[in-house]
Amino acid sequence: MKLMVRGLLGGVVQAGLLAVLLLIPAGLVPGGTWTWTRGLAFVGVYFLLLEVAIVVMARLAPASLEARMTKPASDTQPFADRIATSLILLSSALLLIFVPFDVFYLRLFPAPTPPVSGIGGALAVAGFAIIVTAIYQNAFALPYVEDQTDRGQTLVDTGLYGFVRHPLYMGILPYLIGTCLWLESFAAVIVAVLPVAALVARIAVEEKTLRETLPGYVEYTERVRYRMIPLVW
C-alpha cells in the first residue's frame, strides 16, 4: 500500500509538471488562452492513465514500479548517461513549451485536420501503453543506467523485449508524435527530433553498460537485432 501511495503521489507531481510546462505558456503567449481545451484534455487523460497504470503496477508488478521510482541519478551512473539523461529531460521540456507557442503564436504550419489530430491522440495512448508494458515486463528498467549486478539483474528477452531491445524507448516515439498531433502542431513533430536524438545517444550508453555487465546480453543482441524500431533500427 505504501508503494502505491508513493506512486500515486509521484503521478500527481509528474502530471503537475506537465501542466506547468504546457498550460502556463498557453496562457501567457500572445493569442493564447488559460482554458486551452486540448491542452487541458491531454493533461487530464495523461493523469488518469498514469494513476491507473500505477495502481495496476503496484498490485501486479511492484518490483517494476519500485525500480521506476528510484531517484533519477546514481553515484555509479556513467557520466555519459548523466549528459544523455539531462538532454532528454531538457529537450522534452522545451518540446512541451514549444507546442503552445506554435499553436497560438508562431503557426509555422497549418493545424492538423480533426481526423489527423484524432489519430495523434490514438498514437499517444498506444505509445503510453507500450511504455507501461515495457516497464511491467522488466523489473530492472531504472530511470538511469548503471551496473545492476548487485540487484541480481537478469536478462529479459520475452514479451516486447523479444521484438526490440529497448521497447520503452520504442513507445516514446508514437507517444511524442501523437501528442504533437493531438495538440495540433506539425512543427512540434519536427522539434520532437531533439528528445529522440537524445534517446538514441542514451541507448548507446546503455548498451555499452549492458554488454559489459549483464550476462547473455551480447548473445541477446544477436537474436534481437533491432534496438528501438522493428525492421528499421
Image: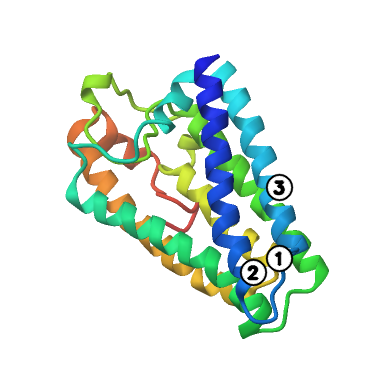
Q: Which of marks 3 and 1 is nearer the N terminus?
A: 1
What residue is shown with label 1? 34
Left or right: where does residue 201 sit relative to residue 91? Answer: left
How far is the residue under mark 2 from the one under mark 3?
16 Å
Identify the image quadrant of residue 25.
bottom right
At horizontal 62% and vertical 40% (from top left) the residue drawn is 129
At label 2, the amino acid type is Ala
Asked if residue 148 shows in the view, the reply is yes
Q: How crowded is mark 3: few (under 14 residues within 10 Å), some or many (20 or more)?
A: some
Where residue 171 sits: x, y (%)?
54, 48
Identity of the residue drawn at 40% across and 49% down: 227
Residue nearest the viewer, comparing 36 with 195? 36
- Dot 2 or dot 3: first in sequence order is 2
* Distance in Å between CA atoms under marks 3 and 1: 15 Å
Q: Left or right of 14: which side holds 233?
A: left
Spatial CA distance of label 2 from label 1 is: 6 Å
Q: Do the residues labelled 2 and 1 touch (CB within 8 Å)?
A: yes
Please give left or right for residue 76 compared with residue 101 in the image: left
Q: Quadrant of the C terminus?
A: bottom left
Q: Name the residue under label 3.
A: 44
Q: What residue type is labelled 3?
A: Gly
